[in-house]
Amino acid sequence: MHKLIRMIYGMLKNDTPYGPGVDQLNQQKTKSTETDLEPMKEDPARRFQSVSLNAPLSRLQKKKRQKSYELQATAGDAKSESS
């Protein structure tokens, strides 16, 4: 239904007769622009940002972050002891 409405709207807006190839050309243009876009490069530093308890948080998130921070601290201590 959406495709039909889109085609009718284009015909009325541009005051042109129906052409079956017009929609196919539009689809090909859309596909070519989608493939031309480069994927976003992930910043590896963002994945390992430190947990901050200073950010505005709900109580639940504060507890989760605090627990995560404690676990990271104990894991860091265990690594330093084994070295």
Image: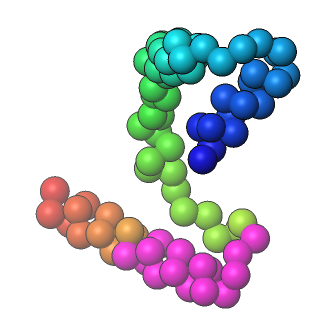
Query: Where does residue 7 sit, x and y in percent of width and height?
Result: 67, 29
Identify the main secondary structure in magenta. helix
Q: Is residue 67 above or below residue 76?
A: below
Q: In the orientation shown, which residue stands out farthest toward the left? A: 82
Residue 33 visible from this viewpoint: no
Of residue 47 and residue 52, the one placed in the foreground of this image is: 47
From the viewer's perspective, is 80 left or right of 19? left
Compared with 59, 73 (above or below) is above
User: Can see residue 35?
Assistant: yes
* Chosen colour scheme: rainbow
Quadrant in the picture for the C terminus: bottom left
Q: Is residue 62 magenta?
A: yes
Residue extending furthest front?
17
Q: Position of residue 68 (x, y in %)?
A: 44, 74
The image shows residue 66 at horizontal and vertical percentages of 53, 79
Q: Quadrant of residue 17?
A: top right
60 or 53: nearer the eye? 60
Q: Residue at x 77, y 31 (%)?
A: 9
Residue at image x 21%, y 66%? 81
Q: How many marks?
A: 0
Answer with left or right where residue 77 lies relative to residue 48: left
For the point 60% across and 79% down, the residue is 61
Residue in the picture at 47% in, 72% down: 69
Residue 60 among magenta residues: yes
Residue 72 locus on image (x, y percent): 38, 68
Nearer the observer, 72 or 34: 34
In this picture, which residue range is highlighted in magenta? 56-71
Between 81 and 28, the one lying in front of the other is 28
